[in-house]
Image (spheres, helix red, strand yellow):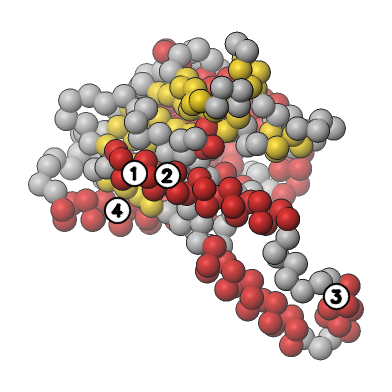
């Protein structure tokens, strides 16, 4: 099979569960492509270190996340992004993409030319670092006259970039969507409970914190960006028509919930199991070793 993993921040940890479930059902991944978090998970898998990465993620709590965040005083980004890459390289050595045991590629976006950049050779971690460069958050990667940012800006699920052999089925795992309606309703219920809380602490907070705090400049820009990325992913799936699509929308977990790795991975396995069952009921093609 040819596997494609989408962008999605911490939600992309569901890709680990998806891969595990696919392999548990006898599918063989012959090639892989990814964007942003999908590029990271896909690259670690192609290097044969996915299990080690999962074990490392179990150690990531809020304190460790802060330790891995190398803040910057730059005007165009908040975080340099070197610490996280260096931490992963401690158990996933950098290799040339062309030397990986399975074909792999990652996509990034050239901010200058406004075009997609595909990494299918050269340094694995340079490709990953470029692909995860979330605009305004991580420092962009400068390479060969390009300024490279997150590939999800243009192609959040690069179904058109993965290498395919004769007989391969095309499988896409898309975590770029977010169930904002359910999240919004949950936030409204929480706000209502807080308003009904007449404790001294609640009354003080009610005076200090304005209504609709969840609707601010940050959430407006974040959700607008997410909606645009989601729309691009939907258009790509309609264009490329993967044989199996694992569409994972979450309401509880966001793009920075890296300390919830096991719960997010479990969601990935569950949704992939459902997608496999749907696929098996609608096709008579072989189910494994593809």
The x, y position of residue 94, in whole percent, is 55, 17
Q: Which one is closest to the eye, mark 4 or mark 1?
A: 1
Q: Which one is closest to the eye, mark 2 or mark 3?
A: 2
Give the distance between the C-alpha atoms of the residues marked 2 and 3, in whole angstroms: 40 Å
| 275 lies left or right of 109 | left
Tag 4 and tag 2, C-beta contact below 8 Å: no
User: In the depicted view, which residue is nearer to us: 181 or 11?
Assistant: 181
- Residue 233: numbered disc: 2
User: In the depicted view, which residue is nearer to us: 188 or 126?
Assistant: 188
Residue position for label 4: 275
| 66 lies left or right of 201 | left
Dot 2: element = helix
User: In the depicted view, which residue is nearer to us: 103 or 179?
Assistant: 179
Q: Residue at x 39, y 48 (%)?
A: 234
Tag 4 and tag 3, C-beta contact below 8 Å: no
Q: Earlier in the sequence, mark 4 or mark 3?
A: 3
Give the distance between the C-alpha atoms of the residues marked 4 and 1, in whole angstroms: 15 Å
Residue position for label 1: 237
Q: Tell me if residue 50 can be seen.
A: no
Tag 1 and tag 2, C-beta contact below 8 Å: yes
- Residue 153: numbered disc: none
């Amino acid at each position: 099979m040819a596997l494609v993993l989408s962008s999605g921040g911490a939600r992309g940890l569901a890709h680990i569960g998806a891969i595990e479930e696919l392999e548990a059902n006898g599918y063989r991944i012959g090639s892989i492509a990814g964007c942003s978090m999908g590029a990271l998970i896909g690259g670690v898998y192609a290097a044969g270190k996915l299990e080690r990465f999962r074990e490392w993620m179990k150690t990531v709590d809020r304190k460790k996340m802060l330790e891995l965040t190398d803040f910057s005083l730059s005007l165009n980004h908040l975080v340099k992004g070197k610490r996280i890459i260096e931490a992963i390289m401690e158990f996933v050595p950098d290799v040339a993409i062309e030397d990986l045991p399975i074909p792999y590629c990652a996509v990034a976006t050239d901010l200058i030319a406004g075009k997609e950049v595909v990494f299918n050779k050269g340094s694995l971690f340079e490709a990953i670092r470029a692909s995860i460069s979330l605009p305004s958050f991580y420092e962009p990667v400068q390479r060969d006259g390009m300024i490279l940012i997150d590939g999800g800006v243009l192609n959040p699920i690069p179904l058109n970039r993965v290498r395919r052999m004769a007989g391969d089925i095309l499988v896409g795992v898309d975590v770029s969507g977010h169930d904002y309606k359910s999240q919004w309703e949950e936030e409204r219920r929480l706000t209502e409970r807080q308003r009904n809380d007449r404790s001294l602490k609640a009354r003080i907070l009610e005076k200090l914190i304005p209504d609709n705090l969840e609707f601010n400049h940050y959430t407006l820009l974040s959700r607008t960006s997410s909606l645009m990325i989601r729309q691009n992913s939907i258009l790509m799936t309609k264009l490329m028509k993967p044989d199996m699509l694992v569409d994972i929308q979450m309401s509880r977990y966001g793009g920075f919930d890296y300390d919830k790795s096991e719960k997010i991975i479990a969601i990935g396995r569950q949704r992939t199991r459902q997608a496999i069952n749907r696929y098996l009921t609608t096709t008579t093609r072989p189910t494994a070793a593809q």
